[in-house]
Amino acid sequence: MRVRLAFLAAWCLLRGYLPDRTLSPSRLALAALGGVCMVLSWTAFFAGFGMTSIATTTIVYHVQPFFVVLIGVIFLKERISPDQILWMLGAFLGVVLASGLVVTHGHADARWALGIGLTLGAALLYAVATILAKDLGQQRAEITVLCQTLVGVVLLAPLADIGHPIPRASWGWLAGIGVLHTGIAYVLMNSAFPRLKTPVIGILTFIYPVVAIIIDWALYGHPLGPAQAARMALIALATLGVRLGWRFPKRRVSAA
């Protein structure tokens, strides 16, 4: 996270975004609040791995689009059509099937239940951060992500073992994660959120596990079977359905 902070700070300075006297304190506070939600979300998400399983945690975490849409409907008074609801359900079904998650009938202990609860909380917090980002359209995305990263550094500093030496070979990976995966990726995400409707943001969130499956197949040699590919196609179809406003055919009720 310190790598990302250094990258974003240097980027903003080189691009002339800082110092900026037009920055609104209220928007900076909103960005900081989003940063708190993001930090707590990822902390709870990774804690869930150790209490359940990677597959279970990933599936439960991806209920976040429903939280995004629900918050938009309740608090932002946004409308969602029955067709959009059906497309979202189809996308979520595709995520569940593509994960290869096998439901067992074993006993779920308190630790497992706590892991599920933490993952649901992580999904809700991420949804809140997404909604907050929608209200920051007039603030540069780089500034928003810089504020969120600074908040993360401060919140996680007491938990970081700063004195522990980092192997030289690890710095390349850290730089890649800090610059590409979180620095540039988060700037692009926060640039897009203000331009999208809440249902579209919700459905696009399902693309993340699809990309993870593709990368796992392409880089790590894990084969992608026909059934899994078909399930990924279901996610892509649902994404297009929401983005392009496709409607399901309606039944005509004949008059008696």
Image (cartoon, rainbow, N blue to C red):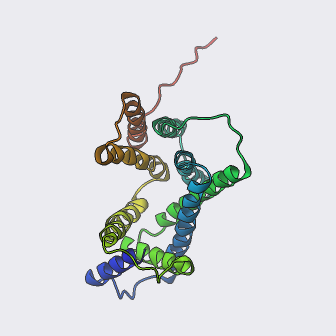
Place of residue 4 in the rendered image (x, y in percent of width and height, measured from the top left): 38, 74
Q: Residue at 47% x, 25% y: name it.
A: 249
Q: Residue at 35% x, 88% y: name it.
A: 19
Instruction: Say above or below: 185 vs 155.
Output: above
Is residue 182 rendered to the left or right of residue 134? left
Residue 77 visible in the picture: no
Instruction: Say above or below: 132 vs 21.
Output: above
Q: Residue at 30% x, 84% y: name it.
A: 13
Place of residue 107 in the rendered image (x, y in percent of width and height, measured from the top left): 71, 40
Instruction: Say above or below: 163 vs 77.
Output: below
Is residue 91 rendered to the left or right of residue 223? right
Place of residue 184 in the rendered image (x, y in percent of width and height, measured from the top left): 33, 66
Residue 229 visible in the picture: yes
Can you say which quadrant of the picture contains the N terminus? bottom left
Which residue extends farthest top? 256
Pick the residue in front: 245 or 32.
32
Q: Residue at 47% x, 29% y: name it.
A: 248
Which residue extends farthest right? 110
Pick the residue in front: 112 or 75.
112
